[in-house]
Image: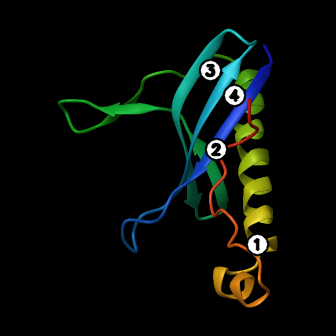
Amino acid sequence: MDVTEVRVTMTQPRDDDDRQRAIASVILDNCFAVHGLRVMEGQHGHFVSMPSRKGTDGKYYDVAHPITAEASQEIRGAVLVEYDRLLRERQEQPEPDQAAANGRPAPRKDRSGPER
């Protein structure tokens, strides 16, 4: 199984307790898409949670998840690599006020992966 495409969209925290940093989608082997993966801020860094739904008992259950450790590592690793790339890109871009002062248009703040 190969992760053939990854799209990550940065999110804004809803409040001070919101640990979600991005939403992601992956395409596996150019034939199966999984949407709703979340990049979360944890105590030991970022991690990826699989799409889930809240059950009637109040617990969250995965909607889709990898069966093997290798598949899990490949999916989560690909999402985090793209998330880190977007973070670096965002940090390298000048603030909108700085761009206007330099006579350039303000850069886009959010990119959702490679264009088709």
Whole-angstrom CA distance, mark 2 to mark 1, is: 16 Å
Q: Mark 2 or mark 1: name the one nearer the start of the chain.
A: 2
3 vs 1, front mark: 1
In this rendering, the label closer to the viewer, 2 or 3: 2
Image quadrant for the C terminus?
Answer: top right
Which quadrant holds residue 52?
top left
Name the residue that disc number 1 marks.
91
Could you tell me which secondary element the residue under label 3 belongs to? loop
Residue for point 80% across, 54% down: 85
Mark 4 lies on residue: 72
Q: Looking at the image, do the residues carrying marks 4 and 3 touch, with CB atoms under 8 Å apart?
A: yes
Disc 4 marks which amino acid? Ser
| Residue 56 horizontal/vertical position (percent) | 17, 30
Q: Quadrant of the N terminus?
A: top right
Evaluate if marks 2 and 3 touch, with contact meaning CB atoms under 8 Å apart: no
Nearest the viewer among 96 and 71 is: 96
